[in-house]
Amino acid sequence: DQQVKQNSPSLSVQEGRISILNCDYTNSMFDYFLWYKKYPAEGPTFLISISSIKDKNEDGRFTVFLNKSAKHLSLHIVPSQPGDSAVYFCAASERIGTNFGNEKLTFGTGTRLTIIP
Amino acid sequence: DTGVSQNPRHKITKRGQNVTFRCDPISEHNRLYWYRQTLGQGPEFLTYFQNEAQLEKSRLLSDRFSAERPKGSFSTLEIQRTEQGDSAMYLCASSPGSSVSQFFGPGTRLTVL
């Protein structure tokens, strides 16, 4: 059972435009959501996170929106740049035990973003 | 480079052999995680250490898999009697515990022939 789903395997966006990547989840116990970016032959790189009690978090060109009632989140990249071309993973965090910071991540299958110059 | 490092980067082995991978986390991070990623999938959680204590193991971690973090610094993941289904990218991540974000190493790609 896939608890975190990214239904779009790929997305192409013109340079300078907005890129919107989507993610759905099923487990109400997730307490944080994270986005990672992955280049070939490298490990995932953390981009941005959002707490389940928030609906928006912004960091430079990256904004994550969370719709808890719909169990849906999205990552907006504005403006899109050629260096943004990569695979983007949505991840949901579930606490291990009771201490903050002890977190198990469940990942989606990724969306390959291609920025067209 | 002060990021997470993993060795070796690539490992090719024959079915039935044992393999061991090493992960060196970011030095001040006391949380360490192992994940496995297969083609077309996202990383899947395997196990978690807080300092030297292994606090969580996934059901994906069969009896052939064992992980250690003896002094709370580097960690090793050993796979005994490898099978072709073990072929995957094995990723290590660390975190300081003051945030939920985990920082990943470049991974070890295992190919079992």
Image (cartoon, rainbow, N blue to C red):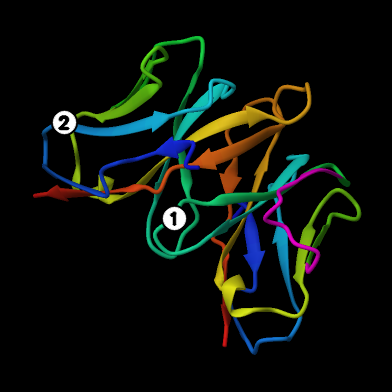
Instruction: Classify B4 as above or below A18.
Output: below
Q: Mainly helix, strand or loop, the magenta region?
A: loop
Instruction: Classify A83 as above or below B63.
Output: above
Q: State the residue at coordinates (58%, 44%).
A: B103
- Left or right: where does residue B106 sit relative to residue A90? right
Q: Nearer the viewer, residue A23 or B4?
A: A23
How far apart marks 2 and 1 lie (CA) works out to 25 Å
Q: Which of the two discs, 2 and 1, sits closer to the camera?
A: 1
The residue stretch that appears in magenta: B54-64
Q: State the residue at coordinates (67%, 55%).
A: B60
Amino acid carrying mark 2 in the image? Ile
Q: Nearer the viewer, residue B62 or B3?
A: B62
Amino acid carrying mark 1 in the image? Gln
Q: Quadrant of residue A25?
A: top left
Q: What number is the disc on residue B41?
A: 1
Q: Quadrant of residue A68?
A: top left
SS class, disc 2: loop
Residue A34 percent location from the top left of the image: 47, 31
Q: Is residue B59 magenta?
A: yes
Residue B47 percent location from the top left of the image: 73, 49
Q: What number is the disc on residue A18?
A: 2
Q: Callout 1: residue from which chain?
A: B
Instruction: Classify A44 as above or below A103.
Output: below
